[in-house]
Image: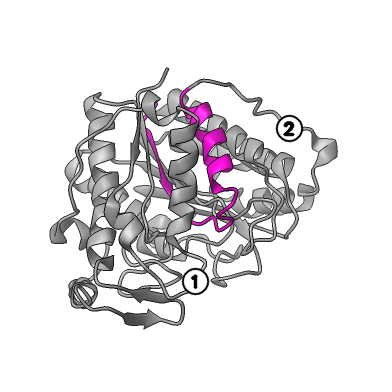
């Protein structure tokens, strides 16, 4: 059984948005309750974590932006953009989220644990270099990716984002770099409006942003086909040293903010797929971080299925039935465009 750490923090529950906001503490209480009641939490390994430092956050965010978010600390309410706000503890919660992922990747590399799933609130992948966006303050996966490159001696990091919304912040932070391969499968056109097939990277990063913009209503078989026919060949050639997963669960079939049809079992199958990529290419070095997912009644069900997969309590099939997919045109078009950079 894998030595898995589930990283949570009281600050993640204390972060508050205005009443009725979809990014609410109940997302996390649903997950933690399901993991506790199922006995899965007791099968995990606790690790020590700490807040990210200013130096770590400013690996990817500007100093003026860091200072601006810091200035909200202790204030009851600050509005940072149309749908992103802070309360008294949001700054500290965001530091704890990035720090939790940094500590996780450090412990994976040192062999203390095999993998980790970090459950931050606020989430991170929409946060840009110099502004908050889409419920996000600091971009946790970007901070951890930059940490792996700057402080751990790694040269190639793969970030896979399966949130239903495009990870605009992560893309833009690494847009001109070949040291991070950013792969995103997302609904399009959709919020935040980025992630089209015209966005391929820039300068040294050209071809290292791999966007898979998808129409609504795709399900498990479609996602697995995209992973098998686009992601896997690219990863085979890139050969990453660490894989970070922006694991949003708003592509779930009844998520209030998404339009996809992925099931809880589908997310488990995607989890098994990326774990096998990690085992094949980077000695199993992989860490997961929660992004979106807003069906508070069923977030626990989804995470239970995923955690069972990570712990090897079940081993799901990662094959797909092409007769049950509708994404053939999408896959063909992406392979055509990216054939300048990767062999398919």
* Colour convention: one colour
Q: CA distance from mark 1 to mark 2?
A: 36 Å
Q: Earlier in the sequence, mark 1 or mark 2?
A: 1
Is 344 placed above or below 82 here? Answer: above
* 253 relative to 138 in the view: left or right: right
Is 254 placed above or below 67 here? Answer: above
Which one is in front in this view, the residue at disc 1 or the one at disc 2?
A: 1
> In which quadrant will I find the C terminus?
top right
Instruction: Please state the horizontal and vertical placement of residue 233, each as a whole percent of the image.
Output: 57, 36
- Callout count: 2
The quadrant holding residue 96 is bottom left
Instruction: Please state the horizontal and vertical placement of residue 14, each as a whole percent of the image.
Output: 31, 61
Report if residue 245 lies within the magenta region.
no
Image: magenta residue range = 283-311
Q: Residue at x 28, y 38 (%)?
A: 105
The circle on residue 109 is none
Residue 212 in view: no
* 71 relative to 130 in the view: left or right: left
Instruction: Please state the horizontal and vertical placement of residue 334, each as a whole percent of the image.
Output: 66, 52
Report if residue 307 lies within the magenta region.
yes
Instruction: Please state the horizontal and vertical placement of residue 24, each as a whole percent of the image.
Output: 45, 63
Q: Residue 167 versus residue 304: which sits nearer the camera?
A: 304
Q: Which residue is mark 1?
A: 21
Q: Residue 192 versus residue 22: which sits nearer the camera?
A: 22
Q: Which residue is mark 2?
A: 320
Label 1's element? loop
Q: Residue at x 28, y 67 (%)?
A: 90
Residue 272 in view: yes
């Amino acid at each position: 059984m894998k030595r898995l750490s589930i990283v949570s923090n009281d600050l993640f529950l204390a972060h508050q948005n205005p009443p009725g906001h979809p990014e609410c503490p109940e997302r996390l209480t649903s997950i933690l309750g399901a993991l506790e009641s199922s006995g899965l939490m007791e099968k995990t390994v606790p690790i020590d974590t700490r807040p990210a430092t200013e130096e770590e956050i400013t690996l990817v965010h500007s100093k003026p932006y860091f200072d601006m978010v810091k200035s909200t600390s202790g204030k009851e309410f600050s509005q940072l953009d149309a749908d992103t706000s802070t309360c008294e503890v949001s700054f500290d919660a965001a530091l704890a989220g990035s720090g939790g992922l940094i500590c996780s990747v450090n412990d994976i590399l040192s062999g203390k644990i095999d993998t980790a799933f970090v459950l931050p609130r606020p989430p991170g992948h929409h946060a840009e270099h110099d502004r908050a966006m889409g419920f996000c303050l600091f971009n946790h996966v970007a901070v951890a990716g930059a940490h792996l490159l700057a402080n751990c001696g790694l040269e190639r990091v793969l970030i896979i984002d399966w949130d239903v919304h495009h990870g605009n912040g992560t893309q833009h932070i690494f847009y001109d770099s070949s040291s991070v391969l950013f792969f995103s499968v997302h609904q399009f056109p959709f919020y935040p409006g980025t992630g089209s097939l015209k966005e391929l990277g820039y300068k040294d990063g050209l071809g290292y942003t791999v966007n898979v913009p998808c129409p609504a209503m795709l399900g498990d078989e479609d996602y697995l086909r995209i992973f098998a026919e686009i992601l896997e060949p690219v990863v085979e050639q890139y050969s990453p040293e660490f894989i970070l997963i922006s694991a949003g669960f708003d592509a779930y079939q009844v998520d209030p903010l998404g339009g996809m049809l992925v099931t809880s079992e589908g997310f488990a199958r995607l989890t098994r797929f990326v774990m096998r990529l990690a085992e094949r290419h980077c000695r199993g070095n992989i860490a997961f971080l929660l992004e979106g997912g807003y069906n508070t009644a069923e977030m626990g069900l989804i995470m239970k299925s995923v955690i069972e997969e990570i712990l090897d309590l079940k081993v799901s099939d990662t094959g797909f039935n092409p007769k049950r997919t509708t994404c053939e045109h999408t896959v063909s078009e992406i392979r055509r465009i990216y054939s300048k950079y990767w062999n398919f």
